[in-house]
Amino acid sequence: MKKLFLTTVVALFATMLVIPALNEKSSVAYGAPTYKTVKAQVIVVNSKAEADKVKSELNNGGSFYAIEKKYSISELDSYRTMTKTEIDQNYPELSELAKTMKSGEISNPVETQDGWVIIKMISRTY
């Protein structure tokens, strides 16, 4: 009885170690799930210096919305929903961020054809 119990405990422990490793390997082998859309807040400025200033204000607890109203050169609303295709075709430099950012995370400044962009991830649909 003791031997059966010990064998069961060892098997369960081994399963707990192996299954997460297999899941990690399969997600690398097959890639992370592809998202359909990304909803984010966006601030667009003209220069790296402005982008760094904006990022600093955000890091110090500034409101994304208030800072966007103060600095952004974009005429579009700061809340944007874009499809994976739109991002890949129009903003390839943001493609990796769209895949990897967590909800609520704020990116470092990224240079695009529209200017320097800082993104706050809201959500992603799959």
Image (cartoon, rainbow, N blue to C red):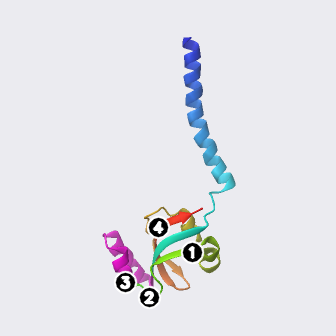
User: Disc 4 residue type?
Assistant: Ile
User: Disc 1 residue type?
Assistant: Met
Q: Residue 9 at what x, y percent from top left?
A: 55, 23
Q: Residue 42 at what x, y percent from top left?
A: 46, 77
Tell me what residue is drawn at x 60 percent, y 64 percent: 35
Tell me what residue is drawn at x 38 percent, y 85 percent: 71
The residue lying toward the viewer, choosing from 86 and 46, is: 86
Mark 2 vs 4, N-terminal side: 2
User: Disc 2 residue type?
Assistant: Ile
From the image, tell me which residue sits under label 4: 122
Q: Residue 82 at what x, y percent from top left?
A: 57, 74
Specify the segment rendered in magenta: 44-70
Estimate the spatial distance between the alpha carbons at disc 2 and disc 1, rounded to whole Å.
19 Å
Bin the neighbour count of mark 3 within 10 Å (Cα to Cα): few under 14, some 14-19, many 20 and up.
some
Whether 69 is among the magenta residues is yes
Mark 1 vs 3, N-terminal side: 3
From the image, tell me which residue sits under label 2: 73
From the image, tell me which residue sits under label 1: 82
Estimate the spatial distance between the alpha carbons at disc 2 and disc 4, rounded to whole Å.
21 Å
Q: Residue 108 at what x, y percent from top left?
A: 45, 71
